Image (spheres, grey):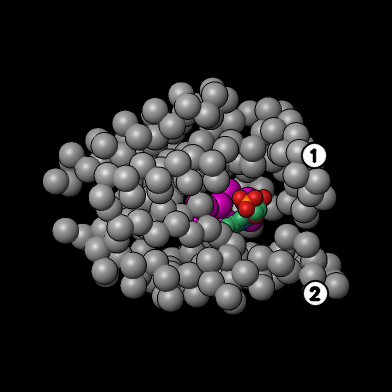
Amino acid sequence: MRGRFISIEGPDGGGKSTQAKRLVRALTDSGKQVLYTREPGGTPTGDLIRGILQHDTSGEAIHPETELLLFAASRAQLVQCVIKPALARGEWVICDRFIDSTTAYQGYGRGFPVDVVKSINEFATQALLPDLTLLLNVDVSLGAQRTHRRNADIGQVEDRFEREDDAYLTRVRDGYLALAEASPERFRLIDASRDEDSVFETVWALISELERSVA
Ligand code: TMP
């Protein structure tokens, strides 16, 4: 039985990482081999790139073009070294962000032509697409509130992306909605303004539906 590739996407503050971890636990409990990974990162090279992108660890400002290509570089390494081998072993792969993050944040957000971003994604992934993309949709203001609260709870400083203004984050959110509308066969839109348990109920129902459809 071949593994499945699920990406979890959405604006910041939608609870992606929490839902991804719950999903990994539930799938593991149901007897599946599951690999959790995230972007940017997920490999030693990707984790170094994450530091540069999130916290400017190179010590210089990152140009938008460089930013886009660094996300793509991190993804290429992750696909080749982690995701493809896991799928070949028949495992389920749960990826916290994937191609659609770049299309939403760098394409719609920064204003790079969306078709150019999509070609770069395709090159980086060798056209690998998730079987299913769960889009955790949340309003920009609620997302920002949750992000600030989480940072305060764990004593973390805002990263480069969390310092972006509302106009940028609104373009990202609208970009995600446009992507979901354009590929309804791959995307499932989930109202992530609800509490964690209700969101997970929906996530689990969608995963069960996917399993039934490919069984
Ligand atoms: P995280 O907070 O979900 O770990 O993601 C880190 C930030 O990186 C988040 O604000 C979204 C941003 N991002 C992009 O701008 N483009 C991308 O391709 C990815 C994967 C993340």
- Residue 5, by quadrant, is bottom left
Q: Name the residue under label 1.
A: 152
Q: Is mark 2 on a helix, strand or loop?
A: loop
Give the crowd class for mark 2: few <14, some 14-19, many >=20 residues within 10 Å: few
Give the x, y percent position of residue 131: 31, 51
Amino acid on which the number 2 mark rests in the picture: Ser
Q: Does the segment drawn in magenta span residue 100? A: yes
Q: Which of 184 and 79 is in front in this view?
A: 79
Q: Name the residue under label 2.
A: 58
In this picture, residue 52 sits left or right of residue 137: right
Q: Does the segment drawn in magenta span residue 92? A: no
Camera sees residue 176: no
Mark 1 CB in 8 Å range of ligand 1? Answer: no
- Residue 204, by quadrant, is top left
Q: Which residue: 64% across, 37% down?
A: 13
Give the x, y percent position of residue 23: 41, 43
